[in-house]
Image: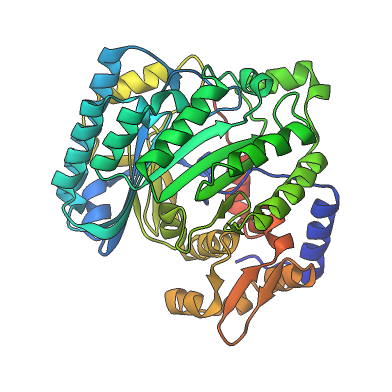
Amino acid sequence: MIKRECGCIREYLKTAISNCHLPSYIYGYPSKRAYRKFETPIDLKEVWGKQKGNLNLYIHIPFCNYKCTYCTLLSAKINDESLIKAYNQALIREIKEYGKIAGHMTVDSIYLGGGTPTILSKPQLKELFDAVTDNFPNIAQDAEIAIEGSPETLDLDKVRFLKEIGVNRVSMGIQTLNKEELKKTGRQHSIEESIQAINNIKQVGFKNFNLDLIYGLENQTKETWLESLQKTIEFKPNSMNLYPVVIRPLAGIQKAKEQNSDKFITDDSKYELYDISCEYMYQNGYHQETFVSFTKLKEDSYKQQVSDFQGNPLIGIGASARSYTNTLHYSTDYVVTKRSTLNIISDYCQKGFENLISHGFELDMDEQKRRSAILNLIISRLNAHEYKKKFDSDIWEEFGQELKAMEEEGCIETNKQSGQISLTQKGFKYSSILGSIFYSEKVKELEKNYTDK
């Protein structure tokens, strides 16, 4: 483990904060940009046959009715029912095969993400959920069963159906309630459809109901952002995610910014909107869970994320899903480009189940410790006693310089008796910067040298 001086780390922190550095939100470590082809493929049965305890399931649905300008996920605008049907059958085949080697584990959460999972028909969704329950019979009584959706796919009939098949968390991206901003995102539904979908979800009575908004969109101002935020809160969602827009390569929004940079706010202005939004959320009874997430619920509003971050393994089903154990992260080897997305989806449908893992990242003990520190920190759940129990080592000895610098900068508060290391309000704001401090030199080098060619 490479040690760095506290002074150097704090200087980096101070500089990054003063320069309003806004890195991409951390939702995993290491990122897929650190994955590489293994010299020797790894047997899937050897990986999962040894696992015990709880398990998370993630199912990737790559289909959408449109392609959002800010999106770089593996997803495709498609109305080819034959391909959707073939993909659903391929998911079911994969679920069955994983059930044979990991069906003994207790399922803590099931999450359907995308793309737009609710683009699937009711029979297709029922078939998919039946496959999960048939092949993973040990589903925890309090399991989170979540699905993402978009407004035009969540009519009252579909929302009622989701409740009937056991879904207990619905997350919908509406992004903005401003007509002109919505148009610039590439979305083809109306503001009225967003409002109707929200009312449908409320009418059916989902206890866990999340809405996403994005700030920093083209032509967005502080006034239009606050108007969207205020209108959305009036619907009283249980939880909300407030994302700063990220300009990534291959996303349509990158070209728009290159051509009209004056129509986009700067990172320091995004931080200003973040501060205003946090204060508004607190005033309306929400508490903060991460840099982007706020909730009124007493329990975790996004159980799969917390379970994953705290070390429970995850099986990813689908064309671009990633899977995690404590020592191994892996996925299909794909490259996302506008030209190849449909080919990737078609290839996934045609290929049989692959028993050998060829692409991923193996975590030695040092990387396991870093992952645990990063992910638990950004959800404000890092605990020295739990770290000691898990790794039989002292986090203050191994990462003391990093933690001391954060504490001196006012980003964390520590309780020696309970072992708790909690983010302050400032810490939440700069949590992606804090997390990056724990990145290993190996991961930084792999990510730096990643190429999508």
In-image side of 107 versus 300 (left or right): left
Residue 393 % position (x, y): 51, 79
In percent of width and height, residue 244 lies at 67, 39
The correct choice, above or below, for 383 with respect to 90 in the image is: below
**Image position, residue 229 (x, y; %):** 66, 40
Q: Is residue 321 visible?
A: no
Percent position of residue 182, x then y:
62, 23
Q: Is 400 drawn above or below residue 79 in the view shown?
A: below
Q: Residue furthest bottom?
A: 417
Residue at point 49% right, 23% down? 193
Image height of 181 relative to 312, above or below: above
Q: Nearer the viewer, residue 3 or 85?
A: 85
Which one is in front, 398 or 218?
218
Q: Quadrant of the C terminus?
A: top right
Residue drawn at x 13%, y 45% is: 134
In the picture, the quarter occupied by the N terminus is: bottom right
Task: Judge left or right: residue 335 versus residue 420.
Answer: left
